[in-house]
Image (tube, rainbow, N blue to C red):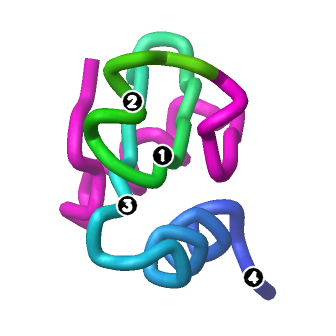
Amino acid sequence: MKTKIDEILAAKINSGENAYLWLHSAEGDCILWPTQVASENEDSADEIGRWQLAVDETKELIETGEVDEVE
């Protein structure tokens, strides 16, 4: 069964080498941006995907090493 983490990682791969994965660990808010610059503008129109993660999912995602920024 495909998990939310699998979905996020697949979305990052499919979004290209400049894709930027941001995670707010305390709130479980995870956003995939097309680039790091797009993440700085925080214009939700630019986001590729957004997920709400449980505490265990947040830890699992961080452990993959694919998160570009953890706040």
Earlier sequence position, callout 2 versus callout 4 = 4
4 or 3: mark nearer the eye: 3
Q: In 3D space, how far apart are the residues under numbered discs 4 and 1 (Cα atoms)? A: 22 Å
Residue 67 covered by magenta stretch: yes
Residue 7, image x, y percentages = 66, 71
Residue 67, image x, y percentages = 29, 50
Earlier sequence position, callout 4 versus callout 1 = 4
Q: Which residue is mark 3?
A: 19
The quarter holding residue 10 reads bottom right
Q: In 3D space, how far apart are the residues under numbered discs 4 and 3 (Cα atoms)? A: 21 Å
The quarter holding residue 65 reads bottom left
Earlier sequence position, callout 2 versus callout 3 = 3
Disc ID at residue 2: 4
> What residue is drawn where x is 41% and y is 17%?
41
Q: Specify whether 46 is left or right of 69.
A: right
The residue segment tinted magenta is: 44-71
Label 2 sits on what residue type? Ser
Disc ID at residue 33: 1
Residue 17, image x, y percentages = 29, 76
Q: In 3D space, how far apart are the residues under numbered discs 2 and 4 (Cα atoms)? A: 26 Å
Disc ID at residue 49: none
Q: In 3D space, how far apart are the residues under numbered discs 1 and 3 (Cα atoms)? A: 6 Å
Where disc 4 sits, the SS reads: loop
